[in-house]
Image (cartoon, coloured by chain):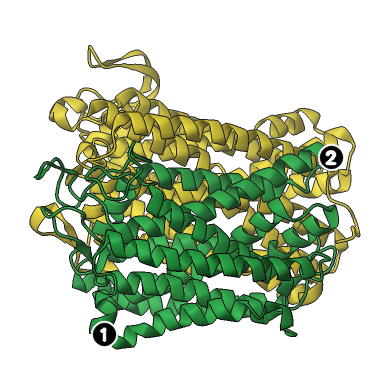
Amino acid sequence: MELFWYIVLMTMLAIYVILDGYDFGAGIIHLFFAKKEKDKKAITNAIGPFWDANEVWLIAAGGVLFFAFPTLYASSFSGFYLPLIMILWLLIFRAIGLELRGQIHNKMWTSIWDKAFGISSLLLALFFGVALGNVVRGVNLGNVVNGVSTQEAHYFFLPLWNPTFSPQTEQLGIIDWFTLLLGIIGVIALTIHGANWIIFKTNSSLNEKLKKVVFTLSFVLLVLVIISLFIWHIIEPKPFHNFIQNPWLWIFPIITFTGLFGLFRVRSFKKHGKGFLFSSLFLFGGLTSTVASIFPKVLPSTNNVNPDLTLYNVAADDYGLSVGISWFVIAVILVIAYFTIQYRVFKGKMDDVGYGEH
Amino acid sequence: MEDMLFYDRMQFAFTITFHYLFPQLTMGLSLMIVYFKWKFLQSKVEKYNDAAKFWMKIFALNFAMGVVTGIPMEFQFGTNWAKFSELTGGVIGQTLAMEGMFSFFLESSFLGLFLFGEKLLGHKLHFVTGFLVFLGSWASGYLIIATHSWMQYPVGYEIVENGKFVLNNFGALFSNPWLLPAYLHNQFASIITSSFVVAAIGAFYILNNKHSEFGKLFVKTGVIFGLISSVLVAFPTGDWTAKNVAKHQPVTFAAMEGIFETEDGGSEIVLIGQPNILEKKLDNKIAVPNILSFLTHKDWNAEIKGLNEFDEKNYPTNIPGLYYSYHIMVGLGTIFIGLMLLAAIQLYRKKLYKTKWILWVLMFMLPFPYIANTTGWYTAELGRQPWLVYNLLRTSEGASPTVSSGNTLFTLLGFIGLYLLLGLLFLMLAGKIINKGPQLNQQH
């Protein structure tokens, strides 16, 4: 039962990262590469009808987390208090930017909201990478100091950073050099992903340039991923333990690298959706490989006093989880139907005016 | 600890007050948009389609605001009220997760189609997408009120080790006696908001001699919907909700009504008066004898327990706040019925569009349904205090144990700043849409 909901939750998170990921990426592209108004318009049109619905996956995943794993929800949301609230602010700020840029035709106005949209997209991509880094690295559960918990065993609180900026101290911060590295990987991966979406959905004059960007960044991404794997080895002595025990788990890293190597051929693709497919594979594989490597842990403990949080010790009661399955299955069928309808109506390339203004 | 609880409560109160300004309009407005679109399909008169499209723009703006201010609501359960989430997540997580899965996906998918898809879909399918948006927004309200009702009147649970609430009857969450009256009361209140907004914009157009054909349509629609909903919000749904409070939360009821002493031979209804907590009485009271007993128990002489009968530990934490919220809500509700009745009479006599003073009043009434809805929500929430889950879990036991008051104050200030900006931008954009107005045969 717990396992079912764990798979559901991870799938929803992966869908969220793939979907909202492309519009974060579009924001980053918008910030760095779109100079002409025509290109900017093409980028915002490419995400216009979708980004609202993409964000719903975050809310829905949050709801499922709350319902199926209330202890994890309580522990991690209060523990990562500051970054989560800042993510909320960024999401709001980004939405304002997107909604407002076209409302008044004034150069200064547009450029202010363009920057708001771009910078908040960039920071969100960074924060999501950092968040993944925190989950891999683990946290000081119970806020243990000198072998004594100052809190209940599954509670903790992390400041944004600590003076040493190191992932290997007792008093950890959210941002250290390891989590920052994963944050940068997040930014690059989502930039590639966003570029692929724009190439897929528009006939923008930027598209040829974006293909080159995807190609170059894919090299950087490969190098950083390899570096991060080495560093991970230093922080956590047995990162590949699960994979050696359960060889079938190798499917996830294989998906990751298939996606990554596929991206190197981006310039020769004739069908434009292909690049997007490969970057989606990379994101899906990267996320699932990471959680598979710590499975069944969901939040490792960095001290020896309090046990790790696993999907079994944070889940809700069996009755609730099993009743949930019945309504959840109905809901998923409906959701698939909505998305099929939505993506069919808005299929193909966006033209210059998108689908009209609202 | 005291500080922390205070800032946590302020933050929740502030963010939910701001958030609820938007859904209360969208829930009612979606119904009226469906009505306009339906009238268009019936009559093929272009005016109705343009009206639907115009209100759709206002709807979309409100919806976007509702979404961005709604995400913090969900997050705060975990960030600021971690202990509460941990203990009750297994129960209210059901209804909250259902809200995400059933209503948000429905609303957001079809809103996109409704906004951008008129040409691609044709009018009939366009109507269907509008109807589905309406359905989604009402489902969302239902699941939130189901969650709220459980906190007021917990059902279908058992308490296990560590004080955790565990669900043992899923169906009970939806057959909760608190749910239906509270839901209907809330939905009619949201129709009131949309009626007053539609009527106010209509009055603005007529008085300005601008888009006056639409002005007449909006005033007429707003008055008809407004009269029906403001009557229904008081009776039977408001009455029914109040009786629930009297029955299940008598101490709340006494504080709401301002009854300090139990009176022999029936309780009076307080129209005006200021609670004086130190001396436990109402100052400057104007009251009508025996009415409250009759309204609550259909018996002029029924006994209603005053606050003196209860343990002070269980008094609502903010008695004056609760008392005023309730009285403002009821007072405004009464004014709404009177005004809408008057307007409806003038409408029936075909004189409304020329009765300038009523149009002026309708225009300036725009903020008041928002105040009534907000104070109504406060009545429910302040009434439940000092409990998060009534009689079972105290608010002081629900806050996050690891988050210090400084952090909460920091994020509270951040939210205030951000929402101030958001509010200003919203008013500006809404003003722009209203000023431009609906157009016949507009290009879309």
Q: Kindly state the secondary structure of the residue where label 1 is placed.
A: loop
Describe residue B423's horizontal placement relative to residue B435 as left or right: left
Provide the letter of the chain coloured yellow. B
Describe residue B47's horizontal placement relative to residue A347 as left or right: right
Describe residue B282's horizontal placement relative to residue A304 as left or right: right
Q: Kindly state the secondary structure of the residue where label 2 is placed.
A: loop
User: Which residue is pictured at 77% across the width and 66% down the height?
Assistant: A209
- Compared with residue A307, is residue A312 higher up or lower down, i.e. above or below? below
Closer mark to the observer between disc 2 and disc 1: 1
Q: Is residue B335 in view?
A: no
Label 2 marks a residue whose chain is A
- Determine which residue is flagged by label 1: A246
Query: Crowdedness of circle 2 by 10 Å Cα count: few (<14), some, many (20+)?
Result: few
User: Whole-percent x and y of residue B364?
Assistant: 69, 29
Residue B170 picture quarter: bottom left
Q: Is residue A105 in view?
A: yes
Residue A348 picture quarter: bottom right
Badge 1 amino acid: Asn
Q: Colour of chain A?
A: green
Residue A267 picture quarter: bottom right
Label 1 marks a residue whose chain is A
User: Whole-percent x and y of residue B365?
Assistant: 65, 32
- Determine which residue is flagged by label 2: A106
**A21 or B142: nearer the eye?**
A21
